[in-house]
Image: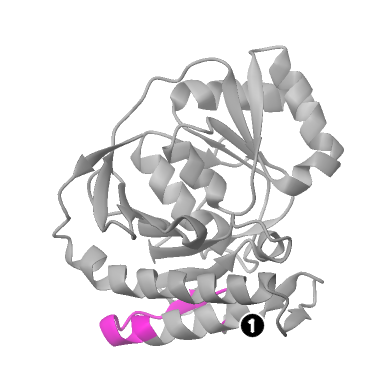
Amino acid sequence: MFKTTTAPQDPMILQLLPIVTQACEILREEYQRYCSGADFDIEHKSDDSPVTQADFRSNHYITQALSQVSDLPLLSEEGLKSERMQWQKFWLLDPLDGTKEFLHKRPEFTINLSLVDGSNTTFAVLAIPGEYSAYFCPLKGQPLKYEMQTESWFEYTEAKIEEPVQIGLSQSARHKPEYGQYLEALGHLCEYSTYHAGSAYKFCMMLEDKVDIYPRFHPTCEWDTSAGQCLIERIGGGLVDSKGRPFIYNQRETLLNGRFIAYKNNAMKQLALKALQQMNL
């Protein structure tokens, strides 16, 4: 949960705030255009995942705007990736996470931007254009939330987790049997309820006390998880693989992630991994 606070003086947040705010406005414009039935360009990548004019427009704007405030390289889902292994410190971007949600007219899409130093994420932004909100994880301190319409700032404060445990699932998890198996295993350990949403939106809902555990068994990429992992690690949670190891970034030939469990605190970690072990995945 969040409590009212004063505007931050963090130079990086102040530099990125107008960029994130304008990128959200761009995506809202594109979403309204798509929902209105106007002409709208949709393509498909080699893996058959959709990419739209909204993805490209957001990517172009953020890429150009970032270059004006930072000389660090940028690794974007919609950009070039060939030189990334040479980078020690760089920006990692998904200019529209949740393209499928966007195309299904569900405003659960996000902008994911993070700063990777070595193999770890040190700073992050997750913005939700449809809710006029953005979550910042500064280099130090608790996550902050910015509400664009009121220009108000809020700071994260821990809330007690109450039963039932809230499980965050992707929309597509409804059709994948391994999630049913996981929930069955979890049901032997605790009472739970499910919360379905797309994209990195679920990480934001973890900050808002609507999700305690987020299991993910089908593919994601590094730009899908870096910002969210940074935010939830800062509040005492984390994101780990099936062996309990935290994700690291830009260390492999592939940018595809394996299975992961995200959790809000250590008690949720133990519960989530115990259910995973009972599945023998």
- Residue at x 60%, y 71% (from the top left corner): 31
Q: How is the image coloured?
A: one colour
Residue 82, visible in the rendered structure: no
* Amino acid found under the numbered disc labelled 1: Gln
| Residue 225 x/y as whole percent | 54, 54
Residue 50, visible in the rendered structure: yes
Asked if 9 appears above or below 44 in the picture, the reply is above
**Which image quadrant is residue 142 in?**
top left
Kindly give the residue lying farthest to the front in the view shown: 36
| Residue 211 x/y as whole percent | 54, 33
Q: Which sits in the foreground, 259 or 145?
A: 145
- Residue at x 40%, y 56% (from the top left corner): 133
| Residue 128 x/y as whole percent | 48, 58
Asked if 63 appears above or below 127 in the picture, the reply is below
Question: Which residue is identified by label 1?
Answer: 53
Quarter of the image with the N terminus is: top left
Q: Which sits in the foreground, 11 or 30?
A: 30
Q: Which portion, as a residue range, is magenta?
A: 65-79
| Residue 77 x/y as whole percent | 59, 73
Secondary structure under the numbered disc 1 in the rendered image: helix
Image-based side of 193 in relation to 225, left or right: right
Image-based side of 57 in relation to 45, left or right: left
Dot 1, how many residues are within 10 Å of its Cα: few (below 14), some (14-19), or many (20+)?
Answer: some
Image-based side of 141 in relation to 44, left or right: left
Magenta highlight on residue 72: yes
Asked if 157 appears above or below 34 in the picture, the reply is above
Asked if 96 appears above or below 132 in the picture, the reply is below
Quarter of the image with the C terminus is: top right
- Residue at x 52%, y 80% (from the top left corner): 59
Magenta highlight on residue 234: no
Q: Which sits in the foreground, 19 or 255?
A: 19
